[in-house]
Each structure stands twice: as structure tokens, then as C-alpha cells.
Image (cartoon, rainbow, N blue to C red):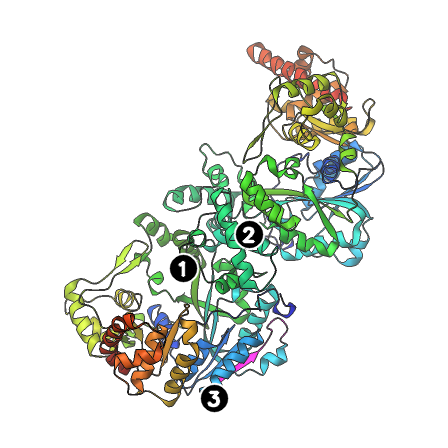
Amino acid sequence: MADWGHGAVTASSYAIAWQPEATPSHIAMACAIAGIGWQPRPAMTVADLGCGRGYNANLLAAANPGWTVLGLDHEPSGIAEARQLAAQAGLDNTRFIEADLGGMGLAEIDSLPPLDVVIIHGVWSWVSDAVRAGIVQLLARRLKPGGVAYLGYNALPASGPDMALQRLLRQLAGPFGTGAGEAAAAAARAMVRLRAMAGALKLPRTPMLARLLAEPAVLEPGFVAHEFLTAHWRPVFQADLCRDLDAARLDFVGSVNLFEALPGMFCDGEQMAVMRRMGDSAGQEFLKDLCLPRGFRADVFIRGARRVDGVAALHGLWLAQVGTLPEESPVLNTGASRGEIAQPLWTQIATMLRQGPARLGDIHAVLGPAAPNPTEILAILVSTGCVLPLFQGGGPQVAATRFNIAAAATYAPHGEDLGEAAGQYGLATPHGLGGLPASALDLAIVAALLEGEAAEPVALAQHLQPRLEGERLLMAQGRIAARLAEKLPAWRYFGVV
Amino acid sequence: MTSWSHGYPADSPYTFSFQAAPAPGNLALVCALMGVEWRPAPRMCMIDIGCGRGYTANTLAAANPDWTVLGLDYNPAHIAEAAELAERAQLENAIFIEADLAEMSDAEIDQLPELDVASLHGVWTWVSDSVRAGIVRLLSRRLKPGGIVYIGYNAQPGFGRDMGLQRLFRHLAGGHAGPSPSRAQACLGTIRELYKTNPRNLTTTPLLTRIVDETDPLNAAYLAHEFLTDHWRPVFFEDLLADLAPAKLDFVGSIGLHENTPAYLFSDEQRAIYDTMPEGVMREFFKDICLTRPFRRDVFVRGLRRCDAAAAMDRQIIAACRTAPEASPKFEVPVGSAELPEELWRPIAAALNEGPQSLGRLRSLTPGRNPTAAELVTVLAGTGLALPVLRDSGPTEATTSFNRIVAETYANEGRQGGQYALASPVAAGGLPCSWLEMAVAVRVGQGQSDATALITELLPGIAATELDAIAQKTAALIAANTAIWRRFGVI
């Protein structure tokens, strides 16, 4: 194992995964729900700590030419790839730094600009105490007063049952070196051995165990290596994370799972009675962690919370549809319950949004006295993937366009063979200040449109895969037609095309 | 909560209980079973780190006048009580020190004598990282080469299943005022209500089942110490071993004797996997996932030297602390139970009822079919029928006065639980007993033999209707145990 990795797995690249919640626009929604004053500004500095291959940092930079986006990672291959994509997209507002957060000196930390937003996704529960201390120090010294932080991490008690599984995989993998692919090979070895012995062991039947044992395999060894072969992986209680972040004077705002602000959506009457007895937010968050099945938490923190009129902030949010809205009221699965808006109310909401972007306050007003709480409307609409917040109007902007074309050229040159759901990418959306979730095929279609191709399946199929013919060509055209019908309006609302 | 306690509840004394595990006779038995060279010396220095109210340390000091026994604790109330008990029993070889291991300097640590034996019971998984670092510094600076360490702790993944429950206690207790036992008590109602709603991540463990059972309430002081601490976290064996590396400790085996014998632990399928694994961390981890034991009680040595396990086991001497029964005792193990067939058991029982025996002699009583030493100790020591003994002795001044003072002072606590032991020069430790047994043994040692008179004195408020029944039981106890108390040098 490479020493500079501090026991983290190196030389095995993470798959690209766009995280819509790990963005300033999503943070703004969580703040509005919590009644805390914070909004993205036209000029900001955003840092992504543990940026991996830098896709998300580059996307944010492309969508927001007024922002400066820093990406830090300990892995040189990720930083090199991130810089390459930035260069291809012609982005001059990104900075990628190969840095060891566990060993950064104060002078090095202080050479970073003051930060408005810090995003730390999938890092905290995977790194050593020294790296955690480095993160806190960075936040303490560089996050501005009033700045916000996002932390996504494995949380207890839900991920507790996976702790033994992780140790077992590490034992079964045995020692491995730093060469390319060695960690993935060790993970593959461990998975084979795990499969052979799982039946004889009394391991808790967690979703992760089921995924590891699935036949045919659903997990890439490279993913398993990153997830499980690190020396430091340990899920944490939310209260302990809050305590550790105290040193950076961070206050807890709320979960990025917007519905969690309304515990009545997933706790029964008795549980709510206990919730009211919890003296503080730490106790209430703990009770949520006890009731919800999610082993991954993502929380928003702020350095210096200012209370504002949350209702006004919520009512002021503009929302636009990100795909075709269903006729039937969409169901939000909280893991412990199902949240949905009554069908007649949903029909009204969908009708409004199909006509174009709308303010949450206006949606709420139209529904009349039966309207659910605006937080509930927002949580259901966002969590079911129906809408995203919209911050400005107008047409496509050059940086986002160049990024979307470069991303497609790099990661989906042929629409990834026109598969439907391959890849978890994002399209830079200047009007959403972030990205729209996109498959590889979506990326390729958008790039073709931006390069002047007509929004028409036959022409697009020819453009993307000129050699297809016969039945396969017809299938490709069909898939492209379906994507256009589903996504084109949203791409327009959000200024992608 | 007081700040000097580093987040550990200091406002209530820990339960008064004797821990048998660190008695050097037990440690010697584990070492012999595992083929590791270690023997108690005539003169030794022991330390009990986190000694609580000092009962175990004082018992060991009383039973072993030539050993020095140190007790360390952060809580002045604990140390004051322990030192007072030592003074009243005139135990000059018991020394109690109030110490904060997180803040003890190297110079302070170096003022301690060099140590042969260290015991850490229920400490490691309850204290902060800085206290853990202090413990490791102490062991690395003061434990002699060849010195032995017992550590009892909450283990992952077994106790990990209760991590949510512990946090629930802490969050709920935060809403209550008052001393920690009453705060712990106040949480119980809410936990029972919540349990009925079946929250997704509140795992039903034996502990939770115990807590929600209203018919058999857990001791509130125990709950407070178990749950209202800031730092409680069970650990994986491999992490403990890694943390202990600066003290150069090697793993010997488990105090739970049967846990050292794979035949008692695994199904055939599990055993086949176990056999492919290298010795050490991986096998111990495999045991932890198969046994899901919440506690581990491990023995470590500074500088492991191998010896012939069979010869070492044959040298160990044990004595029965009850009358050996007609049929072999059964010890429940993860795969079935350990017991001896009748033809093997009968001569062993007879020999044990005569007096202390070496394991070698007990094994040779049935020519042609000898039980293994592992079988024998699991059946005898695992069930608590027999204890290792280190010497032949009558009662000493120290044990006599110590047992008398404990019986007089702590009888009331005993009625509410607590684990007692009669200091025994023969066992070089304690003979486990109830508080009433202890009081009776002390009186018998003073020459009293009339059960009715004895009970009237011990339980002055007893109803006349109950007196006869209890006196009869006491007479039976005296008849059965007098020989055993003599065997262990208690009277």
C-alpha cells in the first residue's frame, strides 16, 4: 500500500458519479428549509476536498464562470485527469491541487483562498484521524464566516453491521502493493473468497453483503477496493462528526435528504413523542439515524448560522422539471415510509410545472388550504427527481457548453454505445448553478445538439454511430427519441442547449 | 458530569465486584494451555489499571502477602475507599494511586515499580484516546520483559450491535438532571416505548432484551457506567493489538478457556475455513464473527516464549470449590456442550473431593482413555467447579482480617447484587461466593457453628417464620463447605 495514501487505496480509479446533492444549489435548499440564511452568490470560491477525478468540480466551474472551484485530492492520477478535462473545456476558473490533507502545513493551508463552500463527499469515514484533523484545520482556517460545508459519510448505527464485513474483506484480500490494478485484484480475490465462505458465517445480511454476493457480480472490484480495502474506514455517529467540526465553528444545518427535516414523514406517533423529548438537534438527528435505513448521511453545516424567515426563502425558490413529469403522484421512499402528495394536488402541480418553471410559493398558493407544507412539496419533488431549483434564465453559456462537449468527447464519445442508463454523469447547467443528472447517452446527445445537430433521432443516431444499420439502428433511434422526449424541455429550461 | 473524569461518570461508585480473570493462577492456566512460558513468581508486582473500588486488588494483596499490588483509578472516591479498606485490613502491600493516565508524565509513570502483571478490566473501551495512549505508555515503560497483561473489553462486532443503544441512552439522559444512575434509570421508560415501535437500526441484542424486560431491572449504577460515558466504543481485536504495539505485547489466548479450543467453537464448515487461515489476527477475527461475543478477555505477554503445552498443563494444580457432583458438569459451548463420560468422570470427581490435584494426575486416572487437558479444564474451570491453586497454606492474618472486614462492611451492598470472593492464600486470589456465604464463612472461621444463632446475628430483622428455613439452608451450607473453605485456606 502506498505510504502517501495513508492507508487509503491508491492506483485504482473511482467511477465518475455526479452528486446533485453535493452542490451549492442543493445546499441552498437545505438552508432554506432549516430557516438559515445562505444563498449562492455570483462570485464565490468553492473547494471539493477529495475531488477524485475532478468531474464534479469541473462541472461546477463550467456552470458558474463567476466562481473559482478548487479540487484537492491525494491521488495524482485523479488530479492529472481533472486538469486535462479542465483544459479541454477551456476552464480558467478551476485549480486542482495534489495535496495530502493529513500532512498539509499551516502555510500550505493558508495559501488557499478564503472559501465560501467546501464539499467533502465520501471522505470523512474513509480517512485516518490525521486526515480528519487536516480537514478540520482547513475548515477552521479557510472557511469564511457564513460559509457552508457539505459532508457525506457513512453513518452509525445503520452502517454498523458492515463494519465486520469490511474487516473480513480486508483480511481476505491480504496485503497488496501500490501498482496499477493491485488493489482491484486484491478486492477481486477477497470477493471470491467471501463468496466461498459467506454461507458458513453469521454475517448480518446487509444490503452491501447482498451486493457483494450477487450473481452475476454487480460491484466492480475497483469500487470494492475503494470502499472497503482502506485501512481507516469507520462509520461515525452524526453527533461525533458535529463535535469534531466544533473546532471549525460549524453549526449543523440539516440533511441533504430534504424530507428529513420533517420527521413526521417517517416516524410514527410514538417515535415522534420520543423525538419531542430529545433535548437538542443531536438527539433528534440520532433518532432519525435510528429509524432510517440509510447507512450514508450527507449533512450541511454553516460557519455561523443566521436565522431567517425560512418560509419566505422557500417560497422564493424557482423550480423547473428535469424530466417528463408522471401522471401519477410520485412516491418518495424514505426507507421507513412512503411520502406522496394527494393525486388531485399532484395533478395541479404537474400541470403548472409542465407550462414552465414556477416559484414554490406560487405552487403552494395554487393548491389552496389542502396544500402540504412547502418543505414537504419540495422534498418530494426534488427527491423523486422531478425538479431542480433554477436560479436564472437565458440561453446556453459558453463555459457550460464547452464543458458538456468536452465531457461527452472524453467519457461518452459514442454515447457509450447508446446504452440507456450507463454512467452517472452530469450536464453543466448555468441556470441551475450545477448539473442535471445524465447518462452517457444524454451527454453524447447534448454534445451533438451543441455542435449543431438537429434535435431529431435519425440525424443524431447517424451522428453518434454512423456504422449502425438495420434493427440496431432502429433501436438506437428509438432510444434517442425517448431521451429527447424525456429530457429536452429540461435541457432548455436549465440552459444546457 | 465532572470535567476531570474525561467524560466518564464519576458521580456514582462502580459496583463492588470481584474480577476473577486477572488472578495469576488463571493467567498461568491460559499460558500453559496455549504453550506459552509464564509462571507466577513468589515475589511479584501487579497493577490493576482502573481498579474501581479496589476490591479485586485488595483481595489479591490479602491473598499474596509477598506480592505488591497497585491499584490505579482516576476517581478519588474509588481510591479513598480502596485505600481505607486496605488500611483497615492492614494490607501494607496494597497501594492505591489516584492517577489520570491521560496526563501522567513519563517521569511520573517511571516512579511506578517495574510490573510483572497488569490487569485492565472494563477500561479500554470506555476511555478517551488520550487515556488509551497513557495506558500504552505505562505498559511500554513499566511492564517487565516476560510480563503478562489481562485486558477485558467490549469487542467488535459482537458489542457493536449495541452501539446504537448506548447512544440512545446518552441522548435521552442529556434531557434529565441529577446523578447519573437516576438519569440512566429515567431513560428506561422511553427506551421501552421506542423499542415497541421497532426502529430499523435498534438491533435486538441480549442487552436490549434485558433492558426492555421490566420484570428483572438492571442495576442503575451499572447502566450509568456502561452507557453514560462519552467515549465508550467497542474495538476490533486487531485494532487493540495494533495500539498495544509500543508495549511489545504478543497475544497469548483467551481467559475463557474453551475459546482457545476450535473444536468447541465452530461448525464443520466454519472449522474448514478456520484451518486455512494463518494464526493470529485473522483467526481471532474469524472467532469474533462466528461467536459474536460481546466481550473479549485476552491475555498478552511482553515477549512470547513457547513451551511444551502438554507438560505445562500437567503441572497445573486445581482444586474444587464445590463438592464434585456425581455426574460430569456440562459446559455449554457454541457447538454443543463440553462434558466427560461417566467412566472418566467418576475417578476425577473422587480425586477432586480429596483435595487439590495436578491436571497431570487427573488425566492419568483412567488408563487407556485420558481426557485432554483442554477438555478437562473446560469442564472443571469453565463451569466454575474448580480453580487453579498456587500454594498449600492455612488462613493467614491478612486473609482472615480482610474477609472479616469485607463481610462486615459490604453486607448491605451484597444484598443488592455484587460479586464477592473470599481471599484465599491457596488460590492466590479469591474464592467466588455470595455475600451471605462470605459472612457465614467468616463466622465459622471464628468458631461459630450454630446456624440459627449465626443467622439471627447476621439478619437481625428476619421474621420468625422465615428463620427456620434459612437456618436449615445455612446449616447445609456449613456442612458442605467447611472442608472446602479449609482446602482454600479461608478458615
Residue B167 in magenta? no
Q: Name the kind of residue labelled 1 in the image.
A: Glu
Residue interval drawn in magenta:
B91-104
Crowdedness near tag 1: few (<14), some (14–19) or many (≥20) residues, C-alpha within 10 Å = few
Residue at image position (75%, 58%) is: A105
Q: Do discs 2 and 1 belong to a common subunit? A: yes
Mark 3 vs mark 1, CA separation in Å: 43 Å
Give left or right: position of B175 versus B258: right
Give left or right: position of B111 versus B472: right
Task: Give, as a three-letter code, the residue at label 3.
Answer: Glu
Q: Secondary structure at mark 1?
A: loop
The residue indicated by pointer 1 is B279
Residue B248 image position (x, y, % from top left):
51, 70
Q: Tell me the residue at 45%/54% (across/down).
A: B211
Instruction: Tell me the chain of label 1.
Output: B
Residue type indicated by callout 2: Leu
Between label 2 and label 3, give the one nearer the viewer: 2
